[in-house]
Amino acid sequence: MALGAQHQTLTGMFVRHGLALTGIGVACGLAVAIVVMRLMSSLLFKVSPVDPVAYGAASISLVATAFLASYLPSRRAATVDPVEARRRLILHRLYPGPVRLLLTAGGSRPSP
């Protein structure tokens, strides 16, 4: 988390970025689906190649899933103390592997 950033600001940034990527993906997916379904219209049975209900339902479900997939982790990221995160990153780089587990569990620092 950035130093001094508010929880709402950080959460909003995560969600906006996730939904922007989702919007691009949904738009490209709809365009490709319309083109491909027109080519495959002979294989469809009692369904039009451009079915707005199916495309709308799929798009809404993808956007809802993307919202949850970006909102839930952003809430957790907003609660992280930046100083503690930096400390753990330094420990991870200095002591990779099982030694790091001892240090983070409250053990003493091993002698080199």
Image: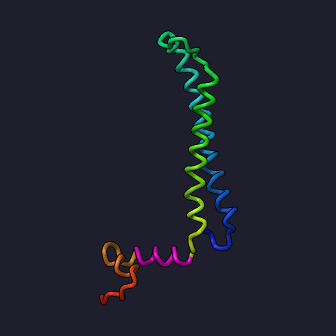
Estimate the x, y position of residue 29 in percent, counting from the top left: 56, 31
* Residue 91 magenta: yes
User: Position of 58 compared to 105: left or right?
Assistant: right
- Can you say whether 89 is above or below 46 in the image? below
Which residue is at a point 68% across and 73% down the rendered structure image? 4
Which residue is at a point 55% across and 78% down the rendered structure image? 83
Name the foreground residue: 21 vs 73. 73
Q: Count numbered badges in the picture.
A: 0
Residue 93 appears in which quarter of the rendering?
A: bottom left
Residue at the far top in the pictured view: 42
The N terminus sits in image quarter: bottom right
- Can you say whether 19 is above or below 31 in the image? below
Estimate the x, y position of residue 101 in percent, counting from the top left: 35, 76
Estimate the x, y position of residue 74 in percent, counting from the top left: 59, 59
The C terminus sits in image quarter: bottom left
Magenta stretch in the rendered image: 83-92
Which residue is at a point 39% across and 80% down the rendered structure image? 105
Residue 95 appears in which quarter of the rendering?
A: bottom left
* Residue 85 magenta: yes
Which residue is at a point 58% across and 14% down the rendered structure image? 48
Q: Main secondary structure of the magenta part?
A: helix
User: Position of 41 compared to 51: left or right?
Assistant: left
Colour scheme in use? rainbow
User: Position of 60 compared to 41: left or right?
Assistant: right
Estimate the x, y position of residue 7 in percent, counting from the top left: 66, 66
- Can you say whether 31 is above or below 40 in the image? below
